Image (cartoon, grey):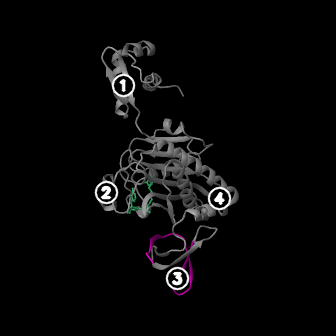
Amino acid sequence: MSMSMKEKILSQLINANGEPISGQKLANELNISRTMIWKHLKSIEEDGYVIEAIKKKGYILQSIPDIVSQERITSYLETKSIGRNIAYYPVCESTQTIASEKASEQAPHGTVIITEQQTAGRGRLERPWDSSANKGIWMSVIIRPEISPQFAAQFTLVSAVAITLAIEDLTDCSPAIKWPNDLLINGKKVTGILTELQADMDRVQAIIIGIGVNVNQDLEAFDESIQSIATSLKMESGQEVNRAELVAKILFYLEKYADMYVENGFEPIKLLWESYNCTIGKRIRANMLRETVEGVAMGITNDGVLELKLDNGEIRGIYSADIHLMNK
Ligand code: BTX
């Protein structure tokens, strides 16, 4: 793809390595007027770049914004197909909604929809998902594995493993996986996963994996209603995290384990999942759509179903539920 004029100006500023570069020089080299240069610089600043103008010398790029644009993610990306097609939105209602539309319009395997801010981010059962501007990872990944629809829910567990490994690689944090779709640090939620399915009776058309990771928020960035249950990587580690790099790392592990799942089934991933989980062995309450049951979580099956031992000794397979970890 050829670079736009704005990208050419930006790349000149980046390549100047902190030395001033004059408006006249830019205008001459790019063969446009100084007024046009000035307009493009304004637009670059609107994207979050900080440009300093020094009298008689020119412009210096002072800082690059921490954005999750396609260019920045691609610069870290090591995958074959996942993330090779990225649609970036500075703001949108929900990446999950856009991804569903794109999936029905034949978007290829591995397409990623990502945004800085969601105005209507959602969790399971249409619950709201707090998605503050420029501080988290809010993305949806479209994958098209050749599997039957009954196995689609497993990709929630595959994704939980992938995100956990990526967070461990790039931070001091070590999340615990709470079945089925939460990652916790010190008991607080740092990540939510929402897996949705488009399928025929016997074949998956697309699985849309919605991933929300709280990265650089401070406590005040969260809605008051969730301040006692939510946390971010920055709050836990004291350090800001490069979101674009973390996105690329998540996509790397997602590709690795999604491929492994399709080739070898769930067993190898189950071992990893078990080593990070904080559900098995605990007494839990499982809230399902029609009933609530309590018991001890015994393990997950090779299909990813949670086995719960009720107080009367009966073993129940739980396919989907909200889990409350009890103290005793
Ligand atoms: P969930 O239904 O398991 O969790 C939703 C619950 O989590 C909320 O009811 C609230 O209590 C709490 N919560 C809301 N926002 C946050 C937050 N930022 N951090 C911690 N806790 C929170 C989890 O659903 C699945 C979330 C998926 C979000 C991604 S973001 C990209 C994609 N687009 C979209 O609209 N959703 C997905």
Identify residue type, mark 4: Ile
Q: Which residue is mark 2?
A: 223
Q: Quadrant of ligand 1?
A: bottom left
The quarter of the picture where the C terminus appears is bottom left
Give the mark nearest the N terminus, 4 or 3: 4
Q: Judge whether residue 12 is colored magenta.
A: no
Distance, label 1 to label 4, CA atoms, is 49 Å
Q: Report the magenta residues as a range.
A: 306-328
Dot 2 surroundings within 10 Å: few (below 14), some, or many (20 or more)? some
Residue at image point 37% right, 53% down: 120
Rendered image: mark on residue 221 = none
Distance, label 1 to label 3, CA atoms, is 64 Å
Q: Which residue is mark 1?
A: 41
Residue 91 x/y as whole percent: 38, 44
Q: Which residue is mark 4?
A: 147
Residue at image point 61% right, 61% down: 272
Q: Mark 4 falls on what kind of element?
A: loop
Identify residue type, mark 2: Asp
Residue 234 x/y as whole percent: 41, 50
Q: Which residue is mark 3?
A: 310
Residue 141 x/y as whole percent: 53, 50
Identify residue type, mark 3: Leu
Q: Mark 2 falls on what kind of element?
A: loop
The number of numbered badges drawn on the structure is: 4
Identify residue type, mark 1: Leu
